[in-house]
Image (cartoon, coloured by chain):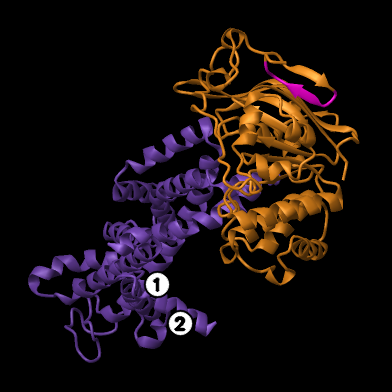
C-alpha cells in the first residue's frame, strides 16, 4: 500500500504543477478544518458571551482582539469556521445528490424527457448565483438547513449539466453497448457502469464548486440571511465590524475576512490541482 | 468433421429483414431484404466488405440498432419467438441469457473500472438467481476455460492485452450458455497470431458445448477454414449462401469469386492476389439493377436494369445473380 502510494506520487509530481497546487490547497483547507473542529480546545472563551473589554485591540489574552460586545474575535473565528463548513458541506451534498442522478438519467434517457429537464435546469442556471441564493434564503428564513438548501439550489444545475454531458459521451462508448448486449438493466448501466466512469470529472466540479459555495455562504451571512445572530459566522462578523473600520478598529473585519479568503482559495487550489492532474491537456501545457 | 450435411432444427429465421439508417443524405439501406436461417449448433460465417451491412445484421438480431436507425420490415423468429414483437424489457431478458455477443474492439468493450471477475459475476447474477458464491465459482471456471487463468480474477481490463481482453469478452458472452453467440469481427483489432488463437478458442468452445455461432467478418480466409456455412453479403444483401465446401470449391457469385481470389495463398509462392476493382457503393443510392454490376467482370445488359432475384439452387445453396 505504502509502496503503491509512493509510486503514485512519483508519477504525479513531474507532470507539471498539478500536484503542488493540490497539496497547497489541501494544507490550507485541512488547517481550517482542524481549527474549526478543535475550537473548544484552542480557545478558552465562549464565542457568544462577553470575554473582555469592548473593542480591545489584539493582545496576549485576545490574540485577535474583541468586538463591540467584548466577545473574543479569535473564538468567533474558530467557531465561525464550523458554521461555514457545515453549511457548505451540506449544500454541496444536497446539490450533488439532486444534480448528479438527474443529469445521469436525463442524459441516458435523451429525447423529450432530457429536453424538458434541461430547460428547467438552464433557467435556474441563468440566474446570478448570489441573487438566487439571497432570494431563496429570504423566502426560507434563517437557519443552517435553510441556508444550505438555498445555496444547494444554485449549484444543482452545475452538477446536472456536467453529469448529463459526461453521460452523453459515455453512452457512446463501446463498453456500454457491450454491457447492454449482455442484457443489463438501465439502472445497472447508469449506476454501476456510467457513474463510476464519470466520477473523476465530477470530483473536479465538486471542489471548484465548494470554493464558490464558501463565497456564497459568506455573502448570505453578510446580508444577515444565514444563521441567526449571535451564532459565530464569518460573513456576519464582517458585516458587524464594517462600520467600525473608519474609526481604526481593523481587527474586527480583517480576521474573518482573511479566513473566508483562505478557505475559498484552499478549495480552488484543490480543484485546480485535481483538474490539472486528471486532464492530460492542461497537464502538458 | 462433416457436420455440414447434418441439419438440425432451425433456431433463427430471418425473413425479408430491412434495417435502414436515416441520414441527412437520405436513407442508408444497411440491410435490405435479407433472408437467412441458422440451425442449432451451426457455425455460420457472414462475410463481406466494410459497409456491406453484416454488422447491422448482427445488431438487428439483438435489437441493438442505434437510433435513428431502425428495423423497417421483415421478421426475426428466434426459437419460435417473434423478436421484433417483444417489449424492450422482454428483449433485455433475452440478451446475455439467450444471445451472447462478442464485439470487435476488445480494447474498448470492457468497463475500465470493473474487475473482470466482477463483470462476469454481475452478468451471471443479472439473469439467474445464482448466489454470489456460486457465481464466483462459475466465473473462475470460465476464466480457466477461456485460457486466462482464475488467478487474474481481480485484475482490471487495462492489465490485459487485446487478445486476453477478447478472451474475457468470450467468457462474458458464453457465461450463461446462450443459444446463439454473435461475434462481430472478433479478431479485426488483433494481430494475426492472436487472431488465429482467438478463432481456435471460439471453435473449440463451440465443439465442446455445441454452441450456435454467427461469426461476422471481412476476412473470408479466416472464416472459411472454420465455419460450416457461409453467407456472403454485398451492399446490404446476401448474394450467396452455401456450405463452406460449396463456396470454397465452387463459388457462384462473381463477388464471392473475387473475394476468394483476393485472398493471399501461402501455397502459391509468387502468385499475386487479385482484387475487386471499384469502390463500395453509396448505400443511400445503391446502383440500379444488380448492386454489384459496376464492379462485376461478367456484367450483362440485364444486370444494369433488373435486380436479380434470390435463386434457391437446393436446400442450402442460394445465389443472387443473373448468371444462374
**Considering only vertical position in the picture, is B119 above or below A53?**
above
Helix, strand or loop under label 2 = helix
Residue B319 colored in magenta in the image = yes
Residue A235 point in image, percent of width and height: 28, 64
Q: Which chain's residue wears label 1?
A: A
Front tag of 1 and 2: 2
Instruction: Name the side, left or right, on which B24 lies relative to B117.
Output: left
For the residue carrying disc 1, how many other residues have a C-alpha within 10 Å: few (<14), some (14-19), or many (20+)?
many
Relative side of A139 to B37, left or right: left
- Image mark for residue B52: none
Q: Colour of chain A?
A: purple
Q: Residue at x 38, y 49 (%)?
A: A154
Q: Which residues are magenta?
A: B315-321
- Please tell me whether mark 1 sits on a helix, a strand or a loop: helix
Q: Residue furthest front?
A: B270
For the colour orange, the matching chain is: B
Residue denoted by label 1: A82
Where is residue B24? Give x, y as percent.
44, 23
Q: Residue at x 69, y 19 (%)?
A: B320
Residue A246: x %, y % from top left: 8, 68
Decide whether residue B59 is among the magenta residues: no
Q: Residue at point 36% right, 87% down?
A: A42
Residue at numbered disc 2: A6
Quadrant housing residue A35 = bottom left
Q: Can marks 1 and 2 be said to lie on one chain?
A: yes
Is A82 situated above or below B83?
A: below
The answer to whether residue A40 is left or right of residue B212 is left
Task: Please provide percent x and percent y for residue B78.
Answer: 81, 32
Amino acid at each position: 500500500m505504502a509502496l503503491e502510494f509512493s509510486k503514485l506520487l512519483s508519477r504525479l509530481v513531474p507532470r507539471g504543477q498539478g500536484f503542488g497546487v493540490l497539496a497547497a490547497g489541501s494544507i490550507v483547507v485541512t488547517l481550517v478544518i482542524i481549527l474549526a473542529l478543535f475550537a473548544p480546545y484552542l480557545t478558552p472563551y465562549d464565542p457568544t458571551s462577553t470575554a473582555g473589554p469592548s473593542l480591545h485591540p489584539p493582545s496576549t489574552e485576545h490574540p485577535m482582539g474583541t468586538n463591540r460586545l467584548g466577545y473574543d474575535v479569535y473564538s468567533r473565528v474558530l467557531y465561525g469556521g464550523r458554521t461555514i463548513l457545515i453549511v457548505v458541506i451540506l449544500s454541496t451534498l444536497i446539490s450533488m445528490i439532486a444534480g448528479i442522478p438527474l443529469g445521469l438519467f436525463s442524459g441516458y434517457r435523451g429525447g423529450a424527457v432530457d429536453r424538458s429537464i434541461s430547460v428547467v435546469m438552464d433557467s435556474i442556471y441563468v440566474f446570478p448565483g448570489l441573487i438566487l441564493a439571497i432570494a431563496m434564503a429570504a423566502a426560507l428564513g434563517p437557519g443552517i438547513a435553510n441556508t444550505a438548501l438555498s445555496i444547494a439550489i444554485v449549484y444543482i444545475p452545475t452538477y446536472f449539466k456536467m453529469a448529463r454531458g459526461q453521460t452523453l459521451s459515455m453512452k457512446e462508448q463501446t463498453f456500454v453497448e457491450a454491457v447492454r448486449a449482455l442484457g443489463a438493466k438501465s439502472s445497472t448501466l447508469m449506476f454501476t457502469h456510467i457513474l463510476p466512469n464519470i466520477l473523476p470529472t465530477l470530483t473536479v466540479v465538486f471542489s471548484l464548486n465548494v470554493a464558490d459555495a464558501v463565497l456564497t455562504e459568506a455573502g448570505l451571512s453578510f446580508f444577515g440571511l444565514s444563521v441567526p445572530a449571535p451564532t459565530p459566522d464569518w460573513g456576519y462578523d464582517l458585516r458587524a465590524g464594517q462600520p467600525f473600520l473608519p474609526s481604526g478598529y481593523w481587527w474586527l473585519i480583517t480576521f474573518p475576512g482573511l479566513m473566508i479568503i483562505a478557505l475559498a482559495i484552499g478549495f480552488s487550489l484543490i480543484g485546480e490541482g485535481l483538474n490539472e492532474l486528471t486532464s492530460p491537456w492542461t497537464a502538458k501545457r | 468433421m462433416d457436420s455440414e450435411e447434418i441439419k438440425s432444427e432451425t433456431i433463427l429465421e430471418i425473413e425479408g429483414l430491412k434495417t435502414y439508417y436515416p441520414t441527412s443524405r437520405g436513407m442508408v439501406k444497411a440491410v435490405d431484404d435479407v433472408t437467412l436461417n441458422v440451425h442449432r449448433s451451426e457455425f455460420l460465417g457472414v462475410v463481406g466488405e466494410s459497409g456491406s451491412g453484416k454488422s447491422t445484421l448482427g445488431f438487428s438480431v439483438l435489437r441493438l440498432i442505434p437510433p435513428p436507425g431502425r428495423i423497417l420490415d421483415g421478421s426475426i423468429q428466434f426459437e419460435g419467438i417473434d423478436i421484433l414483437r417483444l417489449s424492450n424489457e422482454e428483449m433485455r431478458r433475452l440478451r446475455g441469457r439467450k444471445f451472447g455477443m462478442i464485439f470487435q474492439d476488445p480494447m474498448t468493450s470492457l468497463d475500465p473500472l470493473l474487475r473482470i471477475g466482477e463483470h462476469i459475476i454481475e452478468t451471471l447474477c443479472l439473469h439467474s438467481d445464482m448466489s454470489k458464491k456460486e457465481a464466483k465459482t462459475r466465473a473462475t471456471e470460465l476464466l480457466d476455460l477461456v485460457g486466462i487463468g482464475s488467478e487474474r480474477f481481480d485484475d482490471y481490463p487495462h492489465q490485459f492485452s487485446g487478445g486476453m481482453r477478447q478472451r474475457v469478452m468470450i467468457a462474458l458472452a458464453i457465461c450463461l450458455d446462450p443459444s446463439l453467440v454473435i461475434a462481430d469481427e472478433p479478431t479485426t483489432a488483433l494481430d494475426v497470431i492472436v487472431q488465429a488463437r482467438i478463432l481456435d478458442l471460439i471453435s473449440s468452445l463451440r465443439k465442446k458445448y455445441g454452441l450456435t455461432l454467427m461469426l461476422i467478418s471481412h476476412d473470408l480466409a479466416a472464416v472459411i477454414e472454420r465455419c460450416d456455412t457461409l453467407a456472403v453479403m454485398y451492399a446490404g444483401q446476401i448474394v450467396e449462401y452455401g456450405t463452406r465446401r460449396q463456396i470454397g470449391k465452387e463459388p457462384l457469385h462473381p463477388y464471392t469469386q473475387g473475394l476468394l481470389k483476393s485472398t493471399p495463398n501461402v501455397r502459391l509462392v509468387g502468385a499475386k492476389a487479385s482484387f475487386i476493382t471499384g469502390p463500395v457503393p453509396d448505400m443511400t443510392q445503391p446502383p440500379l439493377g444488380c448492386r454489384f454490376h459496376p464492379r462485376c467482370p461478367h456484367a450483362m445488359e440485364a444486370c444494369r436494369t433488373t435486380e436479380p432475384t434470390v435463386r434457391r439452387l437446393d436446400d442450402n445453396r442460394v445465389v443472387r445473380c443473373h448468371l444462374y
